[in-house]
Amino acid sequence: MGAIVASIFVSLVATIGGLYFMYQDKKNRKSNGKG
């Protein structure tokens, strides 16, 4: 049971982290005007 919850938590954190990183990357590109 604990292993399932842990795997779900890890995948959730990875998904949120990836989306947040992509969002920050887009924001940085807009402000810099490069790329």
Image (cartoon, grey):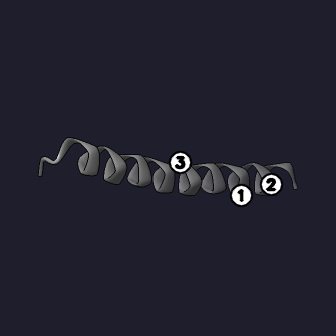
- Distance Cα–Cα, label 2 vs label 1: 5 Å
Q: Residue 17 shows which numbered tag?
A: 3
Residue occupying image coordinates x 33% and y 54%? 26
Q: Which of the two residues, 1 or 16, is positioned nearer the viewer here?
A: 16
**Which residue sits at x=69%, y=53%?**
7
Q: Position of residue 5 (x, y in %)?
A: 80, 54
Crowd tier of the residue under label 2, counting other residues whose Cα lies within 10 Å: few below 14, some 14–19, many 20 or above:
few
Looking at the image, tell me whether mark 3 or mark 1 is earlier in sequence order: 1
In the rendered view, does 33 fall on the left or right side of 12? left
Residue type for callout 3: Gly
- The three-letter code of the residue at mark 1 reads Ile
Which residue was labeled with disc 2? Answer: 5
Q: Residue furthest right?
A: 1
> What residue is at 55 percent from the left and 57 percent from the top?
15
> Tag 1's secondary structure?
helix
Q: Which residue is mark 1?
A: 8
Is 13 situated above or below 8? above
Check disc 2 and report its element: helix, strand or loop.
Answer: helix
In contact (CB < 8 Å): disc 2 and disc 1: yes
Q: Quadrant of the N terminus?
A: bottom right
Q: CA distance from mark 3 to mark 1?
A: 14 Å
Question: Is residue 13 or residue 27 the one in the foreground?
Answer: 27
